[in-house]
Amino acid sequence: MIEFLYHDGIQKEIAAIERRFRCVRDGFAAFERLCEVQFHPTDPKQVVAPAKLHRITQNDIWSMWKVELVIPNSGLRPNQYPRMWFGVKGSIIAFLCISTHIDNYNDKEMDQLARSRITDLF
């Protein structure tokens, strides 16, 4: 069984996005179900398209990924979905940070933020 952790910082970011898109938590629930298959510790199966899931970095302990988080019933087009960074360590998946193109995020800055947050959890 996969264990999901949410960094304190992403909790605040989710709340801010939820004010604009009420269904963001539904998107997280759906993504958690996909992660249980994609990152299964003993029998992983690819269910997320490689074009949507990007490995940012990894070391001997964890790997860090970025994904386009689908928000159902939001009215957003696929290229407008928020990007979310998360870390995987064995059977633990930690959600680190999330941002939208509406907020005009910088990939490099978000990668650095995710790296700093992953060290808080792993």
Image: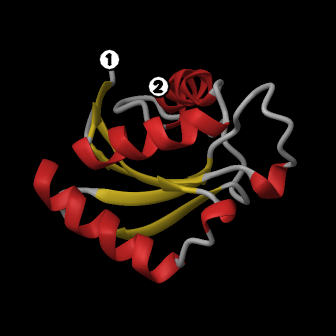
Residue at 32% of width from left, 17% of height from top? 1
Can residue 45 be seen in the rendering of this structure? no
Q: Nearer the viewer, residue 4 or 42?
A: 4
Q: Which mark is residue 36?
A: 2
Q: Is residue 70 above or below residue 23?
A: below
Q: Is residue 96 left or right of residue 36?
A: left
**Residue beneath the point at 68% across and 64% down:** 101
What residue type is disc 2 on?
Answer: Glu
Residue 65 visible somewhere in the drawing:
yes
Name the residue: 49% across, 34% down.
Answer: 44
- Residue 11 in the image, given as x and y percentages of width and height: 34, 38
**Of helix, strand and loop, which one carries label 2?**
helix
Q: Quadrant of residue 15?
A: top left
Which numbered disc, 1 or 2, marks the residue that appears first in the sequence? 1
Q: Are marks 1 and 2 in contact (CB under 8 Å)?
A: yes
Q: Position of residue 89 (x, y in %)?
A: 25, 46
User: In the rendered image, which residue does mark 1 sit on?
Assistant: 1
Tell me the amino acid under the disc marked 1.
Met
Answer left or right for 6 relative to 76: left
